[in-house]
Amino acid sequence: MQDLNKLWKIFNEKFTDTGLVKGAFSAPGRVNLIGEHTDYNEGFVLPIAIGKKIIMLGQLRSDRLVQVFDFGYKVEAKFSLSNLSPSKKDIWTNYLMGVMDEMQKAGYPLQGVNLIFISNIPKGAGLSSSAALEVVTALTMAKLNLLEIKPVEMALLCRRAENNFVGVSCGIMDQYVSCLGQKNYTLFIDCRSNDYELIPFKDPNYQVLICNSKIKRGLVNSEYNRRREECKIATEFFKHKLNREIRALRDITIDEYKKYQAQLPEIISRRARHVISENYRVQAGVQALRMRNYSTFGQLMIESHHSLKNDYEISCAELDLLVDLSLKQKGVLGVRMTGAGFGGCTVNLLRREHIDAFEKTIKQGYKKITGIIPDIYVTPPAEGAKVIKLR
Ligand code: GLA
């Protein structure tokens, strides 16, 4: 990643100094350890923020104009805060405009800004580069405009930007952990109440590794929305069967599921089984981490993958291959696909002394079958969005 001084140099060459407030900010991508497709079912998730992030430099302007330069892709855009509407041409600007739009709708007065940003989060890999862009934009706008916005409110605002402006009906997980993640902790989120708890995740013996299949998540939008619909159908079914308030699949116990599952259409039944059992796995996983029982946690990750593959049907051949290869390696406690699915990454938990052998064998094995060399990132839990101190 470019060093900050170089980036400021480019910033100063590109934009005339307005003499107003300046600052540098960052927001990370994320990897979810367990709890997949549970957030929009008001369930539980357990992600970590990762070391890969977006850095944004900004300076306030005295008018309502926003000028932004994406340093990585060498593209720029200009728009006015008084006239924000989704762009069909420069899709990437929608993440920024969406956040600014939601901030203004929430009553925050904004002035224009000059911005440069740079990212090392791979795009389309399921590591939430879009959430990071939303969050870093929100933080930059808040700080430059001297606004106090709490991290949870910021996360919710960014999610609304993605839902309403970008047009993706994601849940809360990605924006939440990008705002609130902390070094050496996983973030246990209750996606109904939006309460969260930091669960320690630091042990000299174990490490989290991400394997990027380099398969871009093709089908993801339409299939994601379809899964959401299927979950709604299952929820409606249980609402009619059970004599109490049911708001989401989060409210169904495994016993209730077992009692009625035969009455559900087969596909809907499997979708529901994934969500209901995954919520249990997240809670069991949190208990295991509290006891520092990493082997149980790893086992739950493996079960989660099977459920995503067979019941939720959002894996793909390359992700399954990465999982199979990983399970054959020494020192691997758990592995699963992570994120929305249909490509992207696996997340692996393994004993630290086996990392080198793991990387070598996975790369060879995956390349042999797919012709692709996967990227592998070692990622202990990193910190969430923050202000970068100016020297
Ligand atoms: C995407 C969404 C999240 C979540 C995951 C699946 O990353 O943005 O809200 O639903 O998929 O767990």
Image (tube, grey):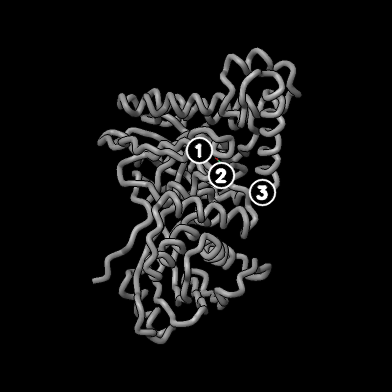
Q: Amino acid at mark 2?
A: Gly
- The dot on residue 35 is none
Ligand 1's quadrant is top right
Return the x and y of residue 283 as percentages of the image width and height. 44, 26
On the rendered structure, is 326 left or right of 312? left
- Does any atom of ligand 1 lie closer than 8 Å to the CB of label 2? yes
Work out whether residue 113 or residue 130 is closer to the camera in this orientation and state it: 113
Asked whether residue 367 appears in the rendered view, the answer is no
Tell which tag, 3 or 1, sits nearer the viewer. 1
Separation of disc 3 and disc 2 at Cα?
Answer: 13 Å
Vertical arrangement, residue 364 with respect to residue 272, above or below: below
Look at the numbered discs 3 and 1 and tell me whether their residues touch, using CB distance below 8 Å.
no
Residue at 32% x, 70% y: name it.
Answer: 4
On screen, residue 258 above or below 248: above
Question: Where does label 3 land, which residue?
Answer: 221
Amino acid marked by disc 3: Asn
Instruction: Name the amino acid type tagged 1.
Output: Cys
Secondary element at image label 1: loop
Mark 3, secondary structure of its residue: helix
Instruction: Look at the image and tell me in which quarter the N terminus lies.
Output: bottom left
Q: Are marks 2 and 1 in contact (CB under 8 Å)?
A: yes
**Residue 339 visible at all:** yes
**Crowd tier of the residue under label 3, counting other residues whose Cα lies within 10 Å: few below 14, some 14–19, many 20 or above:** some
Q: Are marks 3 and 2 in contact (CB under 8 Å)?
A: no
Q: Tell me the number on the disc at residue 171.
A: 2
Q: Earlier in the sequence, mark 3 or mark 2?
A: 2
Tell me residue 210's x, y (percent).
44, 44
Identify the mark nearer the N-term, 2 or 1: 2
What residue is shown at x 43% (from left), y 47% (from top)?
177
Give me the residue at 56% from left, 19% from top.
253
- Please tell me in which quadrant of the rendered image residue 260 appears: top right
Q: Give the residue pinned by disc 1.
A: 191
